[in-house]
Amino acid sequence: MNKIPLIIRSDANTDIGIGHIMRCVALTEELLRNDFDVTILGNVESDKIKKLLKNNFKLKSISKIFPANEDLVEIKKLILEIQAKWVIIDGYHFDQQYLQELKSLTNVLLFDDFVHLEYYPVNIILNQNTDLYKDNYKTYKKTIKLNGLEYVILRDEFIQSRKTHKTVKKIAENLLITIGGSDKSNITFKIIKAINQLKSFAFKVKIVVGPVNIHYQEINDLVKNSNVSSNHNFDLITGNFNLSDLMNWSDIAITASGTTIWELAFMGVSFLYLKVEENQEVIVNELKKNNLGLYLGDGSNIVIEDVSKQINNLTKNYEIRKMFSQTGQALIDGKGKKRILENLKAFKV
């Protein structure tokens, strides 16, 4: 059977982070199982992410990204070369003109998180974070809108390792800090300081430092000092690891309001969360609507003492953590990418 040629266009660097490319990886896993021949076209800064993509998928590197004209030239050339039936776009730097140019050549699915364009000249709009803005998209009459948490995309590692009902301890002991691939504002540093103020606990803390995080040395120095001077045991996680294993291990996570939120919810982990980018306001509102997690506010102006207090409260409150765990697992069923695939295959021009 002939495979369906498809291009995914997404990038990963210090400014953009790695969230866009990683949810594309999750979708690619499903596409490859279902007769699609996928080429990922992207500018990937991290050697670790580049290695992951090259070892598991077909990666074609691009040196200059839109609005550089070379980006459009490169992707249009690739569409014609492989006769791509679909292009999947994930990134906030792609504008209406870019999408229109691609739509003139093939079918386009766009990841969108916060309705930032005036018009969407695409075949399918995918917003996995909320269905609140479904009617706000200005687009073709025939455009399909896949909006809401039923379309949350998870990598296979989460689906395969999820426990049906996560065990919730009476008192939390294991903390996971994961503030995204770049953490430009070095929020991780402040979270460690907040944990150090909690003198009546002896936490085991695992800290994920993303592959494009420029603050590694500063965080590493603080961890070394904290392991000597505090009651807690801190462990920096870099290199090769399964985030799903860390989530199964953890009792509480402290995270940014990005894709990781839905992974934690699916795995049944209670979490405290921050907004680190303006576009994350959509997820913050969705979490508040569903009474899921404790909001720590805007990451750019968090107060260390307030974070300590919130961690203390959630650690001691078994009933709240149990409710968060059950709510998260009820909201995210892990079938999002199968539903997206069904729409791609059923699409009629």
Image: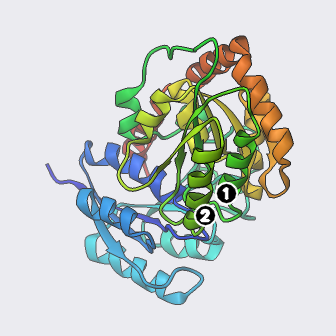
Residue 103 at x, y percent in the picture: 50, 68
Instruction: Identify the amino acid type marked 1.
Output: Thr
Instruction: Identify the amino acid type marked 2.
Output: Pro
Q: Residues within 10 Å of mark 2 (few under 14, many from 20)?
A: many
Secondary element at image label 1: loop
Residue 138 at x, y percent in the picture: 72, 56
| Frontmost residue, 282 versus 302 | 302
Residue corresponding to mark 2? 121
Residue corresponding to mark 1? 139
Residue 86, picture quadrant: bottom left
Apparent side of residue 348 relative to residue 99 in the rendered image (left or right): left
| Frontmost residue, 138 versus 282 | 282
**Residue 127 visible in the shown view:** no
In the rendered view, would you say 135 is above or below 320?
A: below
Residue plotted at (73% across, 55% down): 276
Upstream in the sequence, badge 1 or badge 2?
2
In the rendered view, would you say 274 is above or below 231?
A: below
Residue plotted at (49% across, 85% down): 64
Quarter of the image where the C terminus is located: bottom left
| Frontmost residue, 244 versus 144 | 244
Residue plotted at (65% across, 45% down): 229
Alpha carbon of mark 1 to alpha carbon of mark 2: how far? 6 Å
Apparent side of residue 267 relative to residue 276 in the rendered image (left or right): left
Residue 114 at x, y percent in the picture: 72, 53
In the rendered view, would you say 170 is above or below 230?
A: above
Q: Residues within 10 Å of mark 1 (few under 14, many from 20)?
A: some
Question: Are discs 1 and 2 less than 8 Å apart at CB?
Answer: yes
